[in-house]
Amino acid sequence: MTTPHIRHTSPTDEGGRGLQLISALCQRWGTRHTPTGKSIWTEQPLPSGRRE
């Protein structure tokens, strides 16, 4: 099982942008291998004015 990595896509590619979006929108992200595949976790800031 391989770890996903950010691909460099061209304007005509129809896939491969998922991790680019995650990287642009999240503070941190990573992957975990599971018995059935892999999952991606993210950390995102809360909007200002909201408390945890």
Image: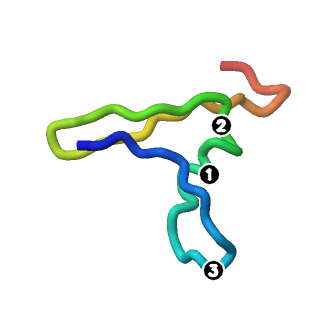
- In this rendering, the answer to whether 48 lies above or below 9 is above
The residue depicted at 40 percent of the width and 34 percent of the height is 31
* Element class at badge 1: helix
The label nearer to you, 2 versus 3, is 3
Mark 3–mark 1 distance (CA, rounded to whole Å) = 16 Å
Measure the alpha-carbon separation of dots 1 and 2.
10 Å
Which residue is painted at 22% across and 36% down in the image? 34
Q: Which residue is mark 2?
A: 26
Instruction: Identify residue for label 1.
Output: 20
Mark 2 surroundings within 10 Å by alpha-carbon count, few (fewer than 14), some (14 through 19), many (20 or more):
few
Q: Secondary structure at mark 3?
A: loop
Q: Amino acid at mark 1?
A: Gln
Mark 2 is on which residue type? Cys
Drawn side of residue 38 relative to residue 29, left or right:
left
Specify how the rendered protein is coloured: rainbow
Looking at the image, the residue that sits furthest to the left is 35
Q: Which residue is mark 3?
A: 12
Crowd band around label 3 with a 10 angstrom C-alpha radius: few (<14), some (14–19), many (20+): few
Do the CB atoms of the residues marked 1 and 2 lie less than 8 Å apart?
Answer: no
Quadrant assignment, res 24? top right
Q: Where in the figure is residue 5, as x and y percent of width and height?
A: 47, 45
The number of discs equals 3
